[in-house]
Amino acid sequence: MSKPLSSKCSVGGCVRNLNDCCPPELQVLSRDGSGRVVACKSACTAFNNDAFCCRNEYGAPAKCRPSVYSRLFKDACPSYYSYAFDSPPPLVKCDAKEYVVTFCPASWGSGELQEM
């Protein structure tokens, strides 16, 4: 996560939690058996399909078009890329001279922090 140190900045993000609106075929479920959705895969990752992955005969902007899945992602996160040839608005809009960048540990909440 990054945060500009200026109140004149705008940082894009998601307007909805993708896990809450993720179609069943893209859901990654918790390993604890609770059925809780912990992530939402891209259609490319889920189906390994040339059209969803924008590769081979679909590897050009004229051939690779948004899918129902990429539109779902775009609706939830309008500032992010939802498919290979998407062109979202800039993620960060500002001229801040300083930012705070936060890196989340691999095992979030484990209590163990490593210094760099």
Image: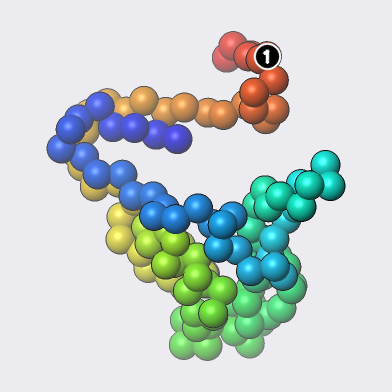
Q: Residue at x 37, y 68 (%)?
A: 87
Residue 14 vertical position relative to residue 69 in the rendered view, above or below: above
User: Disc 1 residue type?
Assistant: Glu
- The answer to which image quadrant residue 5 occupies is top left
Counting from the top left corner in percent of width and height, residue 40 is at 64, 58
**Could you tell whether 44 is left or right of 80 in the image?**
right
Residue 97 seen: yes
Estimate the x, y position of residue 54 in percent, counting from the top left: 59, 77
Look at mark 1 in the image and give the residue it sits on.
112
Residue 82 visible (yes or no): no
Left or right: where 91 falls relative to 116: left
Residue drawn at point x = 64 percent, y = 23 percent: 109
Quadrant hosting residue 49: bottom right
Q: Where does residue 107 sit, x and y in percent of width and height?
A: 70, 28
Depth check: give the residue in front, 13 or 103.
Answer: 13
- Which residue sits at x=32%, y=28%? 99
In the rendered image, the quadrant that contains the N terminus is top left
